[in-house]
């Protein structure tokens, strides 16, 4: 019964994370962005644009933080779907959690920068603005490093989980290929500037992963709860 409850909770978190991620990407594209990307806080024009955007920029970065934070509740369910008896799946879930913690830290730093740097730049004297821009450049570099670490470690974990799903003999096997596609798209777009559009495709496949596995966890959790109830009776 407890296992069924864990799967159900993990499924809910997976779907919530997907919903927030969809809203975040859609809002970013509406604001003129090309999908998930690092903000250059060392650029005066960028700081002015964020400041002029008011609460929209704050909302966007808050949502970007909430989406991976919610996904933390889904990982434990992937352990069951991939096969908790499989060593590569256990290692994959661990690596994915470590990588996601890097991503959450990166998003938290980005939110802090959005909340403070544009206003600080506008209020600073001409002499002090160079110091604000230097701090912004440092924040941008730190965010990029955390993004790279989180993506590499987390995506390696996702590949291992995908390997466990590919070993299944049911319809969930297809999500192994979805996971591999998501990793390849996001990694290529992150490391090779010319392939940047593939990163958005990778995020789209990640959404398919989150939604599909979220629904699967809800179904298995519901079936497990019904089985447990029947056995008690």
Image (spheres, rainbow, N blue to C red):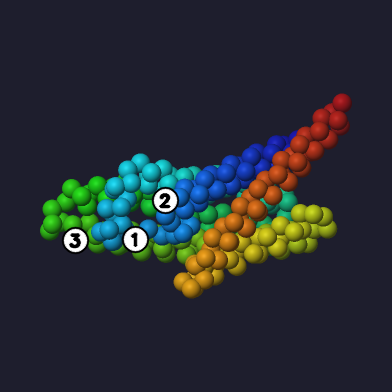
Q: Give whichever of discs 1 and 3 has the lower sequence position.
A: 1
Residue 187 appears left or right of 37? right
Disc 3 + disc 2, Cβ < 8 Å: no
Looking at the rendered image, the quarter that the N terminus falls into is top right
Q: From the viewer's perspective, is residue 114 above or below residue 178?
A: above
What is the spatial separation of the Cα atoms under label 3 and label 2, in whole angstroms?
A: 27 Å
Q: Position of residue 44 (x, y in %)?
A: 25, 59
Looking at the rendered image, the quarter that the C terminus falls into is top right
Q: Position of residue 223 (x, y in %)?
A: 80, 38
Residue annotated with mark 3: 130
- Residue pushed farthest top? 233
Residue annotated with mark 2: 31
Q: Position of residue 5 (x, y in %)?
A: 70, 36
Q: Nearer the viewer, residue 114 or 45?
A: 45
Q: Residue at x 20, y 59 (%)?
A: 131
What is the spatial separation of the Cα atoms under label 1 and label 3, in whole angstroms?
A: 15 Å
Residue 196 appears left or right of 169? left
Element under label 2?
Answer: loop
Residue 164, quarter of the rendered image: bottom right
Q: Residue at x 27, y 58 (%)?
A: 45
Q: From the viewer's perspective, is residue 137 above or below residue 63?
A: below
Element under label 1?
Answer: loop
Label 3: how many Cα within 10 Å (few below 14, some 14–19, many 20+): some
Residue annotated with mark 1: 40
Which mark, residue 190?
A: none
Q: Position of residue 116 (x, y in %)?
A: 28, 47
Q: Give whichever of discs 3 and 2 has the lower sequence position.
A: 2
- Mark count: 3
Q: Residue at x 53, y 58 (%)?
A: 99
Q: Is residue 127 visible?
A: yes
What is the spatial separation of the Cα atoms under label 1 and label 2, in whole angstroms?
A: 16 Å
Discs 1/2, front: 2
């Amino acid at each position: 019964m407890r296992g069924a409850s864990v799967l159900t909770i993990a499924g809910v978190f997976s779907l919530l994370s997907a919903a927030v991620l969809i809203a975040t990407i859609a809002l970013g594209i509406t604001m003129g962005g090309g999908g998930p990307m690092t903000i250059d806080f060392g650029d005066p024009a960028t700081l002015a644009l964020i400041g002029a955007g008011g609460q929209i920029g704050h909302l966007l970065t808050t949502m970007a933080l909430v989406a991976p934070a919610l996904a933390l509740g889904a990982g434990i369910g992937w352990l069951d779907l991939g096969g908790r008896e499989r060593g590569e799946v256990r290692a994959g879930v661990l690596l994915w959690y470590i990588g996601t913690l890097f991503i959450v830290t990166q998003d938290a730093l980005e939110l802090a920068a959005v909340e403070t740097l544009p206003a600080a730049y506008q209020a600073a004297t001409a002499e002090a603005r160079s110091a604000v821009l230097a701090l912004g450049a440092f924040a941008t570099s730190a965010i990029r490093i955390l993004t790279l670490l989180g993506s590499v470690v987390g995506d390696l974990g996702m590949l291992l989980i995908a390997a466990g799903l590919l070993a299944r003999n049911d319809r969930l096997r297809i999500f192994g290929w979805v996971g591999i596609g998501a990793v390849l798209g996001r990694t290529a777009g992150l490391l090779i500037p010319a392939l940047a559009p593939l990163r958005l495709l990778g995020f789209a496949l990640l959404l398919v992963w989150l939604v599909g596995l979220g629904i699967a966890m809800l179904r298995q959790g519901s079936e497990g709860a019904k089985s447990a109830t029947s056995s008690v009776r």
